[in-house]
Amino acid sequence: MAALSSMAISCLHSHSCNKSCFLSPQVSKPLLINPSQKKPRSSISFCIKKSDHDEMQIQQEPVKEEEEDSWVVTAVRSRYNEIVIVDTVSSRYLLLDSTRNVHSVVDKGGQNWTGSYWDESVSLPPIIPNGPIAIYGLGGGTSARLILELWPSIQLEGWEIDEILIQKARDYLGLSELEIPTSKGGRLCIHVDDALLPSQDDSGKYAGIIVDLFTDGKVLEQLQQVSMWLELATRLMPNGRIMVNCAGIETEVQNGKPQLLLDDSAWMLNSTIKILSEAFPGQVSWKRTPDSKGLNFVALTGGLPDLSDWSKKVPVRLSETVKLWNLCNTLTKSVLLNAT
C-alpha cells in the first residue's frame, strides 16, 4: 500500500495557481509548493490500494473546512511504477512511484513552459549538430512537447520502459498528439524499451541525448557508473551532447528551509555530475535552476559552449539563464552547507 500525501496534492494546486516551485532536497523531481501559503487550499488524502484487476482504488478523504480542488483522474500499478494522474483546475500532473514526485505536467491553457527543469531541454538544439534528439525517460512528454513547439522540425525519439505509463500518457496527457508530424515535419517517435540496453543500431545516431531517468525519486544506479556514460556517448554524432537532469543535493533543513551556500564547486555535492566529470574530464558543464524553478542540477557534456552566442540562439525566455552554465572545475574549493 502506498499513500498520496495531502502535501503532494496541495503542492500541485499551488503550481496550478502560478505560484513558485522548488525541489525538495531529499527528492529528485520537483515537488511544487507555495512557500507563502501557510495552509494548503486543498488538502486531500488518497489511499491507494491494488485490486484484483491491478487497478489502484482511490479513497478520497477531504479534510474538514478545506476546499477540494485537486482530484485523481486515473491510477494504476504497473510492473515499474505506481502511476497516478492528478487534475487541478488549470493543469494535469503525472505522479510516479512511492515518492509521488511530479514527472510530467500539462497546462490546460496550452502554456508549455513549465517554470521548472523541463524548460532547460529547449536550449539544447542550438548547440548540437542537425539530427535527431533522444529523450531517455520520456514520462508524459513534457520536454518533448515544449521542444516541438519551439523547434518544430526536430525529430525526437522518446524512450520509456513502462508500456502502461505510455498508454496512460496517450489517453490522459495528450502524448499521442506529439506523434503526429508538425507543419515543419518534426515529431515524436516512441520506443517502449530500456534505453540503457546496448544497441549497435544507435551508434553515432543522435545529435543530442536528454537523460531524465529516475526510480523511487533517485537517479538510476546505472548512471552512477563511468562505463555507462561512455557507452551512451558512443550513440552521439560528432560534436553531439548529452544533457542530464541530475536532481538536487541533500541538505539539512532549518526553520522549514534548505540551508545552502553555493559556490562554483556546488556540483561536487551531486553524485551524478561527479561521475559525468570522471567520464568526460574537462568536458562537463553544470547549472542549478533557481530556487523558484526547482533547485535541480542539470549537466551538459561537450565542454562549455560560447555563452554569448548560445544566448542569442535560444528562446528569449532562456537568453539570460543559459549564461549561468559553468564548467566543472575540480580545483575549486568545497561548498559550504548549512550556513547561518
Image: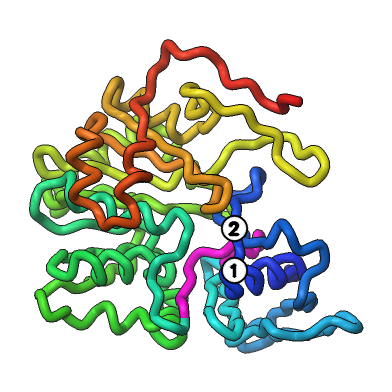
Quadrant of the drawing holding the N terminus: bottom right
Predominant SS along the magenta part: strand
User: Which of 147 and 55 lies nearest the eye of the viewer?
Assistant: 147
* Most foreground residue, 150 or 167: 150
Q: Residues within 10 Å of mark 2 (few under 14, many from 20)?
A: many
Tell me the element at label 2.
loop
Residue 168 seen in this snapshot: no
Percent across and percent down for residue 46 are: 76, 78
* Residue bearing mark 1: 15
Residue in view at x 46 percent, y 43 percent: 246
- Residue 21 is tagged as 2
Q: Amino acid at mark 1?
A: His
**Which quadrant of the view contains residue 137?**
bottom left
- Residue type at the position of mark 2: Cys
Residue 305 falls within the magenta-colored stretch = no
The reply to whether callout 1 and callout 2 are in contact (CB within 8 Å) is: yes
Q: Residues within 10 Å of mark 1 (few under 14, many from 20)?
A: many
Give the number of the disc on residue 62: none
